């Protein structure tokens, strides 16, 4: 198998590859461009090619240099970004290429169990992933929502809260100010910069 490194934000081979695979928003060039523009990071992809030169496996990554040192991360500022591999052979080809840089490699895996079986890596954190199937009708969706969420929804209705799609920068700025206060005052976390939402 041949290896190829490409710019994941611009190379059509990565774009075409993720379109043909079961991938996520975080594998998409559009998402990577948001990260690139906001945080000024280069985002590449390491790909495995078959004998005909067609991509069959890949992982996007960025080389991060900050106060924690130099490392390879797949993918910074993303909830998860599983390597797109089908078997251990593809995985070994990809990860050996990245480990060959002699830099620590950090992965955020959620769906693909293959990297989790690699003894060269340690699980540092585990998180819960919550999701809801939105294909059902509204009544069914409403019944699936927790009682506390339904009470909060009714309270918001009584207090005149409305939901609008932000269609100008003034509304985006208003959303950001709310986001900033929640992150800072409720969760005691640093908020993403305004540029992150602007680029989205």
Image (spheres, rainbow, N blue to C red):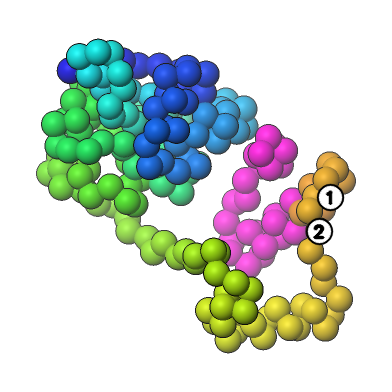
Give the side of residue 20 with respect to residue 57, left or right: right
- Tell me the magenta residue range: 176-200
Find out whether the residues at labels 1 and 2 contact each other: C-beta distance under 8 Å.
yes
The residue at the point 60 percent across, 72 percent down is 137
Cα distance, mark 1 to mark 2? 9 Å
Name the mark on residue 126: none
Q: Measured along the vertical axis of the image, is residue 108 above or below residue 14?
A: below
- The percent coordinates of residue 87 (x first, y second) are 17, 38
Give the side of residue 51 with respect to residue 58, left or right: left
Q: Residues within 10 Å of mark 1 (few under 14, many from 20)?
A: few
Q: Is residue 182 magenta?
A: yes
- State which tag comes first along the sequence, 1 or 2: 2
User: Between 179 and 84, which is closer to the camera in this rendering?
Assistant: 84
User: Between 176 and 57, which is closer to the camera in this rendering?
Assistant: 57
The residue at the point 75 percent across, 83 percent down is 155
**Res. 2 in view:** no
Give the side of residue 125 with respect to residue 120, left or right: right
Quadrant in which the N terminus is drawn: top left
Q: Secondary structure at mark 1?
A: helix
Name the mark on residue 171: 1
The residue at the point 82 percent across, 83 percent down is 158
- Which quadrant holds residue 20? top left
- The percent coordinates of residue 57 (x first, y second) are 28, 29
Name the mark on residue 164: 2
- Which quadrant holds residue 126? bottom left
Quadrant in which the C terminus is drawn: top right
**Res. 131 in view:** yes
Q: Secondary structure at mark 2?
A: loop
């Amino acid at each position: 198998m041949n290896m190829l490194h490409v710019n994941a934000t611009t190379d059509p081979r990565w774009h075409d590859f993720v379109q043909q695979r079961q991938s996520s928003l975080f594998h998409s060039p559009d998402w990577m461009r948001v990260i690139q523009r906001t945080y000024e990071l280069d985002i590449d992809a390491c790909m495995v090619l078959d004998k005909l030169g067609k991509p069959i496996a890949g992982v996007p990554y960025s080389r991060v240099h900050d106060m924690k040192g130099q490392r390879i991360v797949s993918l910074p500022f993303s909830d998860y970004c599983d390597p797109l591999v089908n078997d251990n052979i593809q995985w070994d080809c990809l990860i050996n290429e990245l480990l060959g840089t002699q830099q620590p490699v950090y992965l955020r895996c959620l769906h693909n169990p293959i990297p989790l079986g690699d003894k060269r890596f340690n699980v540092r954190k585990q998180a819960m992933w919550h999701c809801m199937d939105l294909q059902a009708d509204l009544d069914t969706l409403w019944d699936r929502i927790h009682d506390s969420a339904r009470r909060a929804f009714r309270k918001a209705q009584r207090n005149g809260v409305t939901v609008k799609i932000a269609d100008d920068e003034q509304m985006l700025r208003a959303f950001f100010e709310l986001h900033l206060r929640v992150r800072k005052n409720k969760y005691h976390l640093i908020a993403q910069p305004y540029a992150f939402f602007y680029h989205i």
